[in-house]
Amino acid sequence: MEVNAKVVLTIDDFREVGEVVVGARHGVPLQPPPPWEVASPVVVIDSREVTGGELFIALKGEHADGHMYINAVFEKGACWAMVSRQWYDAQGSVELPPGKGFIVTDDTVAGLQQLATIYRSKFSIPVVAIGGSNGKTTTKEMVASVLGVAFKVNMSRGNRNNHLGVPLTLLQLRPDTDIAVVEMGINHPGEMALLASIARPTHALLTNIGHEHLEFLLDLDGVAAAEIPLFDYLRQRGGIAFVNADDLRLSAAGEGMAGSVTYGIAKSPAHSCWAREISVNRAGQLSFLLCSDFGTEMVVLNFTGKHNVINAVAAAAVGHHFGLSLSQIREGLEGLAPARGWKRLEVVDSCGLRILNDTYNANSDSMRLAIDTLCDIPCSGKRIAVLGDMLELGVAGDAEHEAISCYLQRSSVDMLFTFGERARIFGREVPGLCRGHFESREKLLEALLRVLQEGDIVLIKGSRGMKLERVVDALINARTITITGPE
């Protein structure tokens, strides 16, 4: 693809966002002035990331106010700082050193978003937005890995997918970027329309509609109403949607969209890609036959959980649309491995145990999928589930926890340990499986170590706020486990 030539932030761009203030003495600007043009800008919101030449955005959060670090970031080499009008006026007179400047705006969050929108408009490249309830980050990584076989890809890093992360991702675009892959996460109505207006995607993929953030989105219809505006944005602008035909709400939302690309697990004449022969080996690795009208390729993923096949097929559909062959798609999928600390069904072998670390987050859909994964992986010992509270479910909380209890009743889980306030509900329908409810991670760990044996596989899952990764770390560091006789 063509290299983007005009990709600098200029003083006029800064003036579009807010008032530009530079150091002066007796009305004469100090020399040297800050750079009037910033090529390949490095924009940060954490003062610790400043090493020299950055534009620092001073954000006021719950625990810290970035304005407190203005002097520090300038001393460390930042050239520009975006500050709030309220803070700037409260300072009275601010003496800026040479080579430094302020962008003064009413709201620094809105200023960051506006600056990112301006910068995004300088690029004539495909921008692929990834949203949906479950599997966004995994799918984003897969899409970027597949496209990376043939293109220079810039993607969202880590979990930078919200009203701050999306602008920061866009500001990382570079002249040689061919395609951007931008993850978009929401938890309130109206947020997807905002993120789409900032990123201006040309293509979009919604993984699924599930039980996410019900505290704010209420029910599945509310989730769909919050996520589907991403497709609406494309529909209004002639963009391309990648539609998961296995999700009824998404399938309906994608109807009538010109140029939309559908995919699913089962073969269909309308599908770009689909899958067959799905299996899980003893190491937990997935394999499947990736299929399209142009042939098949056997793919072995470095991920576990059969639900990740649909994420891989989604990535294949994107790759296929952009002209990659099935062998290139396989190369991209097989070349991706979860980083250490992934915490999304991350497989960890320790002390003869296999641990499924799924502590990144939880809702009832991902909880069911994690339980399925625990039961799908071949195991010579016991299958043990350690489940913590699912948060942000609002009034649906008790009912969603009760539904998981019923789901456990139909599973092949051998033992259940629960942790938190509402997690106690998980054991209601399976009192024979439940070996204890805990509100102390230390006591939970002690109980686990008394029953664990070599060959066991243990799933540890809960919402991020439950901090169950501490139990995972403790098990990894335990070095030995208590070897007991069969229960």
Image (cartoon, rainbow, N blue to C red):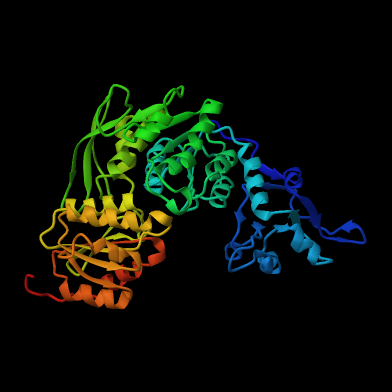
Residue 119: image quadrant is top right
Residue 267 position in % (x across, y down): 25, 27
Q: Is residue 325 visible?
A: yes
Q: Is residue 223 above or below residue 75?
A: above
Is 346 left or right of 233, judged from the image as shown? Answer: left
- Residue 3 position, x and y percent, is 56, 34
Q: Is residue 393 visible?
A: no
Q: Quadrant of residue 300?
A: top left
- Return the x and y of residue 480 as percentages of the image width and height: 19, 76
**Residue at horizontal 14 percent and vertical 70 percent from the top:** 453
Query: Among all residues in the image, which is located at the extreme left?
Result: 486
| Position of residue 368 measured from the top left corner of the image (x, y, whole percent) | 27, 51
> In the figure, is residue 118 to the left or right of 12?
left
Instruction: Kindly identify the residue that appears in the image at 21 percent across and 56 percent down.
Output: 408
Residue 420 is drawn in which quadrant? bottom left
- Compared with residue 427, is residue 368 higher up or lower down, i.e. above or below? above
Tally the marks.
Answer: 0
Left or right side of 1 for 453: left
Q: Nearer the viewer, residue 380 or 253?
A: 253
Q: Quadrant of the C terminus?
A: bottom left
Q: Is residue 249 above or below residue 82?
A: above
In percent of the image, x 33 and y 27: which residue is there?
A: 272
* 269 left or right, relative to 206: left
